[in-house]
Image: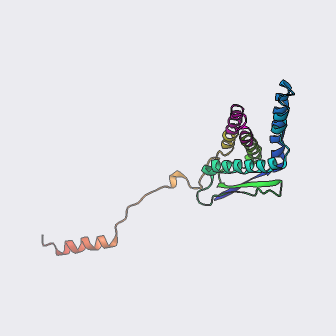
Amino acid sequence: MSKTITLNLNKALIFEAVKADSFDTARIEKVEDPVKLAAAAAAQQGGEDHQERQMLRYLKAALGKFEALMSEFVDVADGSIEDTLSSSQDVFTVTMIVNDRYNNGLATPMSSLCEDYLVNQMLYDWWRKSKPEYSKNFVVDAQDAIDHIRLCLAKTAPSSSSVDYTDVTGTVTQNQNQTDNEQNNQDSDPA
C-alpha cells in the first residue's frame, strides 16, 4: 500500500521572497556608500526580464535537488516524485508516492518547509557568484529546511495484527508414504 503526498506551492510567492531578500540586502549595502554602491545595488535588486528567466532556472534546479533529496522516502514498489512546475503558471505541485505508514497530518508543514528550502536554495544561487561568503548562509538555511522535512516524513507505527501470538502452534504428522515404506521394510525383514 502507498500514499500520495501532494505539496501545493506558488511560484509567485517563491519569486517574491527571493526578490524581497535581494532588494533588502542591496538596500542595506547602498546605505554604506550611496554613490559608489548605487549601480551594484540596482543590479542586485533584480527586476529585469532576464532575471525572471534566471530565477525560473534557479527554481527548477532547486526543485530538482529537493526531489533528489526526497528519493530516499519514496515507496520502492510504487514510488515516484513529480512536479508540475511550468513557466506559464504560478501554482504548481510536487507529488511523492510514499509508504502508507507516513503521517497524514504533516503535509501542510512539509509544503511550507519545501517552499523555504526552494527560496533559500535559489538565494544561494542568486548570491554565490557575487557574494560567495554571504551565499553560504542560505545553504545552511536550506539544509535546516530539509532536516525538518525529514522529520515530517516519520512513519507511524505498524498496525497490530488481528492474530494473537498464542495462535502460533506447530504439529508433527507422519506422512503416509513414509508409513507404507516402514511397513514394507518390516514385512521384508526376516529377523
Q: Nearer the viewer, residue 18 or 143?
A: 18
- Decide whether residue 140 is among the magenta residues: yes
Displayed quadrant of residue 122: top right
Q: Main secondary structure of the magenta part?
A: helix
Query: Total of numbered circles in the picture?
Result: 0
In percent of width and height, residue 87 lies at 80, 56
Looking at the picture, how far across and down is residue 8, in whole percent?
Answer: 79, 52
Of 85 and 136, nearer the camera is 136
Residue range of the region highlighted in magenta in the rendering:
122-144
Q: Residue at x 72, y 32 (%)?
A: 134
Q: Is residue 180 above or below residue 167?
A: below
Taking the image as shown, residue 71 lies to the left or right of residue 42, namely left
Give the quarter of the figure containing the C terminus.
bottom left
* Residue 67 highlighted magenta (yes or no): no
Whether residue 59 is visible here, answered yes or no, is yes
Name, please, the residue furthest toward the top: 32
Q: Quadrant of residue 33?
A: top right
Q: Residue at 41%, 60% (x, y): give it.
A: 171
Asked whether 154 or 174 is in front, the reply is 154
Q: Position of residue 65 (x, y in %)?
A: 66, 48
Q: Is residue 159 visible?
A: no
Question: Furthest residue to the front?
Answer: 36
Of residues 101 and 148, the one drawn nearer to the viewer in this rendering? 148
Q: Is residue 172 above or below residue 113?
A: below
Q: Quadrant of the N terminus?
A: bottom right
Position of residue 86 measured from the top left corner of the image (x, y, whole percent):
78, 57
Q: Residue at x 73, y 47 (%)?
A: 58
Q: How is the image coloured?
A: rainbow
When the figure is inspected, residue 8 is found, relative to residue 77, above or below; the finding is: above
